[in-house]
Image (tube, rainbow, N blue to C red):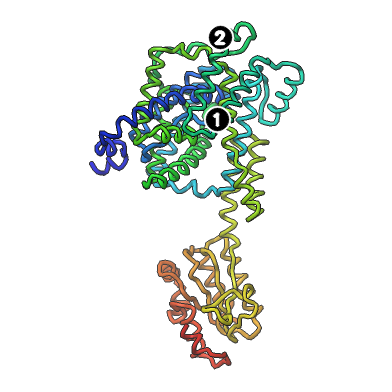
Amino acid sequence: MKHWMRWLPGLDTLRRYEAAWLRHDILAGLVLAAMLVPVGIAYAEASGLPGIYGLYATIIPLIVYALFGPSRILVLGPDSALAAIILGVLVPLSGGDPLRAATLAAMMAIVSGTICILAGVARLGFVTELLSKPIRYGYMNGIALTVLISQLPKLFGFSIESDGPLRSLWATARAVFDGKTNWAAAGIGLGTLAVILLLQRYKRLPVVLIAVVGATAVVAALDLATRYDVTVLGPLALGLPGFAVPWIGPADVIPVLIGGCAVAMVSFADTSVLSRSYAARLGDRVDPNQEMVALGAANLATGLFQGFPISSSSSRTPVAEAAGARTQLTSVVGALAIAFLLLVTPNLLQHLPNAALAAVVIAAAISLIEITDLKRIYSIQRWEFWLSIVCFVGVAVLGVIPGIGLAIAIAIAEFLWDGWRPHSAVLGRADGVKGYHDITRYPDARQIPGLVLFRWDAPLFFANAEFFKERALDAVAKSPTSVRWLVVAAEPVTSVDVTAGDTLAELDEALHAQGIELCFAELKDPVKDKLRKFGLLAQLGENCFFLTVGAAVSSYLEVHDVEWEDWEDQATR
């Protein structure tokens, strides 16, 4: 029973639920629902789907995450960061058919959910940590720009045919100059955007709801849909989402799989960051693997109930928090309120203008853009800043999915480069400083005649083993005195593979040919155990391994008669 409860933290919360929380959760749920409705519809439209699917993709994940989610107040649903990915898959495959688009989007949600669940069960929740902050900023800024550009035609009241962010921007600009702008729609859209941007600093105000209700009221009161051809949402479908398996054709499998993988990566990267930040604020601890399972379960269920891929929300979660949410019951109340809307008053939003929905999405895209921290990164380490810019340009020029693929490739390359060409140093003793230090940082540091202390600051594996050998031999060649011992200060070496083990054997043979002893200091026991399996302890001898660098120095000075000032004090240290 305890094993299953670990995967269902919502039940554990229910067992410990306090009556005093109920009023806060109900009120917060109603406030949240008022924001979720227009936002869900807007993000569905931005993803190339009819607005009703945005509500389907809001109801289901709220309920599922309440059961599986480890975070007490995190809110899941359609997200602006995923809109460009979904749109990039749907546009070339759907052929303008909304039902086909909905089927493809639902299958993307199932793919994404399955990947997240499997990764969570396999305890791979750490994988998104491989994406450094500059890389994450880069692809998110690119996604934000892509989403913003995709909504400009709708904001100005016309439509375009184009593929790719830059082509879409060019087509939009050309349409504006050709006089295709519907100024009534543009006025509504720009007014809605202005209200959202001006009021968003007031965290307790339902800013999106205020702006959307105002735009809807203006369109309805002035009959702008009829008089000025302002496109509106129209009546929503009556009823709740039903269970349906989204069958797709063989030709759709590869792009849907790629899109689902991209969704899984982006959604979990954002969800894990948001979940950790709120857990720290509330004094909780969130298991990233359970977070991945919960996100996967929400996506899987959404795909089976006519929804599309979802993620956590950095704009709706603060609304729930500000409204007084205590637990995930807030999300359940919000889901029930939206379900009530679909069952009882589906025509309530029929005058909602599409230009206002575009403004909601554009405002969300603007909130995704990160500039301030990139300035800080530029001042600290410029190559990481330019790494972020490359990822940004990749998404903006190549498209969202190829751009994210580029970001992943860069992340892997960055990770491998740090291990492939790590830092190494020759150590000496500097006056007034305990221990042994890099002689390039301490030019006055003294080296012991005949002894080279060589530190390697990384694990030893196939990609850097030969480089390690080259650097070690180079340190010997550059020694100011004839070398008798080479001692590897191996504390940073956390692992050794077979390739590296064979390279160490080759290094030992090359040094022995020169009459030089190869020794190790501060080698961790698990690494030493591997060297024993590789036969290196037998080749080198147990007496060539020392607990500390100081012990290695002391042993060397006992064996070799060298002139070394205050060496006894140094050996003791």
Badges 2 and 1: C-beta atoms under 8 Å apart? Answer: no
Q: Can residue 203 be seen in this view?
A: yes
Name the quadrant containing residue 180: top right
Q: In which quarter of the image is the N terminus?
A: top left
* Relative to 434, 239 lies left or right: left
Residue found at the far left of this picture: 1
Question: Which image quadrant is residue 562 in?
Answer: bottom right
Give SS at disc 1.
Answer: helix
Which residue is located at x 40 percent, y 29 percent? 61
Q: Mark 1 points at which residue?
A: 199
**On the image, numbered disc 2 is attached to which residue?**
221
Give the answer, above or below, for where 255 lies relative to 272: above
Q: Count the marks.
A: 2
**Residue 261 sits above or below residue 27 on the image:** below
Crowdedness near tag 2: few (<14), some (14–19) or many (≥20) residues, C-alpha within 10 Å:
few
The spot of residue 99 in percent (x, y) is: 50, 17
* Distance between mark 2 and mark 1 Cα atoms: 24 Å
- Amino acid at the residue labelled 2: Ala
Task: Tell me, for residue 227, which label it has, or none.
Answer: none
Looking at the image, which is closer to me, 118 or 162?
162
Instruction: Sort mark 1 into few (<14), some (14-19) or many (20+) by Cα contacts within 10 Å.
Output: some
Position above or below: 528 against 264: below
Horizontal and vertical percent for residue 130?
Answer: 52, 49
- In this orientation, does residue 499 appear? no
- In the rendering, at what x and y percent does residue 81 appear? 54, 34
Residue 447, located in which quarter of the rendered image?
bottom right
Q: In this view, does 174 lie to the left or right of 119?
A: right
Q: From the viewer's perspective, is 282 left or right of 16?
A: right
* Image position, residue 304 (x, y; %): 41, 25
385 lies above or below 466: above
- Helix, strand or loop at label 2? It is helix
